[in-house]
Amino acid sequence: MGQIAPTPFVIPDLIIQTIHFMTYEANVRPAWIVLVLLLLFILAYTVLNDSPLIQSISNPPKQNISRKGFSNFKNSAENEMCLKCHGQSKYSYTNKENGKIIVKRMYAEAIVNRDDFYASNHREFKCTDCHSEDYISFPHSGDLRMEAIATCVDCHGGDEKYAKFQFETIDTAFMASVHSQKHSEEFTCWMCHDPHTYKINARTTENLKETITYDNLICLNCHGDNNNYQLLSNKPNPNLLQKHDWLPNQSSHFTNVRCIECHTRNEDTLIVAHFITPKNQAVKKCESCHSKNSILYASLYKHQIKQNIEKVGIIKGLFFSETASIGPDRNNSLNLLSFLIMGLTVIAICIHVFLRIKNK
Amino acid sequence: MNNHSSERLYLYPLWIRIWHMINAVLCLILIITGLSIQFSNPSVVVKFKTAISVHNIAGVLLAINYIAFFIGNLFTTNGHHYIMPVRGFFKRLIIQIRYYTIGIFKKENPPFPITPDQKFNPLQQFTYVATMYLLVPLIVLSGFGLLYPEMTLKSLLGASGLELTDFLHVTVGFFITLFMCIHIYFCTIGKTPASNFKSMINGFHESH
Ligand code: HEM
């Protein structure tokens, strides 16, 4: 036993002693390799996994737009006149008769959350672009309840600027979908795309997981909420977890793909499929996604693949894309390399066999 | 022919033969089903769903079998053959490679004749240690990560954890397949091409 090294050298000394012990008179004791691997795995899977440190390195917190931050938006001053009441779950006014301040609960469907609105595609609009100017006065006139509400196509239809979004094709696909077929007029674009909060996602996102959650929450808004579901249907809401219990690793599927991956029929030209199919036509075969011709390439990964390579470069784009799934996730250049190595090995073996026979 | 020509050495104890038989069969199954999953288009050789189930079951069995190997080598003398002397190892490796690429065709004697104390030549020892103590543990560990993806690390330094685990699993799988091809071929270099395979059945090694 050597004497204990002075403090600064304790650690390096310990390491050297450990290595010496592990290699045991300069012999590699292989069991130690396995032990070290096991420890590394446990470390990676428990300590590093989800640790706040690693999380903050990998996903720096998004800047939260402060209340004041909204003033940067066009029309925000004017909109604040509406949002001061409609921006949260309560509003107040002064009773002119007795001068008392009355606080009342805002009707849930009339609330427009500022964070959501100013993140949405329509954030630069004025409330009165779509709603009557007469709302300026309070209490609002009863006649205003008869106000016709604009549909998406009212503004977006036939407009060249929006041609690339193909609202007409979407409309046709939607008309054929179960939502339209089963629920007649009550089911409008609004059910999924509330113009106050909707933001396009799939084609602009840098975080696929966020898009998946955002899009799935649209479906869950009714299919995961009995109250909303029964606004449109008298049937009980099927239990989604039970209905999908055939799916292996259910929670991984729910967080890594969108409902529409399996429940829509995809038209090539459309960016997001709107033809929701009846339940018996939903995709149920593993190979539909987990194969070279994965349907996900035409849907979920459509933008991701293009973008990834453009933005982060080929290496990161190919290796560390978020498109994690078995099968379709193969890397072609690595495949080629593996075939090459395997081929060369076989050739080398053949030459060896040939020379062995020849020199017998 | 040298003086230990007709010697028969008992080198492969029963437990290692049983372990090895199970291991070889499971590896073959895992490679075939693994390739079917990796190259599903949509189904190659084995149907996707079948391939997944078979691959999962075989993987768990392989892991259990590996534990048997690990413990066996830890507590029996067979483990001595896996302890690699570091000093001069590289030199001995080169000598062995030279033998396989040149010497063997000149009918030279093997540079490291097999003895009860040393049943592996340096090249064998290196590849067996690398495979059994690095590659197989890695593929087993990453396999468990993929079997329970909810438990798998979500992200590591910005990369998707599942993706990294998958990448590791597939890459190591490739190297094990490569090992197996080379391994089986090198086993044909014995007294006769079949004699090493016989050894792995009856336990006795026939020297050159
Ligand atoms: C069909 C496939 C296989 C065949 C025909 C085969 C054949 C053999 C033969 C003949 C031996 C004895 C000769 C020697 O010591 O080199 C052997 C030993 C060995 N093989 Fe294999 N093998 C196969 C697959 C594998 C696989 C997949 C692995 C590991 C992943 C493996 C690992 C080993 C090890 C570690 C030894 C030495 C065992 C000991 O004596 O401690 N083999 N194999």
Image (cartoon, coloured by chain):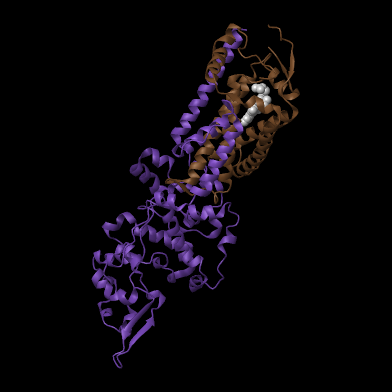
Q: Residue furthest front?
A: A3
Give the quadrant of ligand 1: top right
Side of A196 relative to A344 (left or right)? left
Relative vertical location of residue B53 with respect to residue A67 in this rendering, above or below: above
Chain corresponding to brown in the figure: B
Residue for point 48% across, 46% down: B161
Q: Quadrant of the N terminus of chain B?
A: top right
Residue A314 x %, y %: 37, 38
Which is more toward the observer, A267 or A242?
A242
Side of B35 relative to A60 (left or right)? right
Which is more toward the observer, A247 or B94?
B94
Which is more toward the observer, A45 or A224?
A45
Is any atom of residue B184 visible in this view?
A: yes
Q: Quadrant of residue A320?
A: top left
Relative vertical location of residue A31 with respect to residue B147 in this rendering, above or below: above
Q: What is the number of callouts on the image?
A: 0
Chain corresponding to purple in the figure: A
Residue for point 55% across, 62% down: A240
Side of A81 relative to A357 (left or right)? left
Q: Quadrant of the C terminus of chain B?
A: top right
Residue B126 x %, y %: 58, 24
Residue A144 x %, y %: 31, 81
Residue for point 35% across, 40% down: A313
Is any atom of residue B44 visible in this view?
A: no
Residue B11 x %, y %: 72, 22
Relative vertical location of residue A136 with respect to residue A184 in this rendering, above or below: below
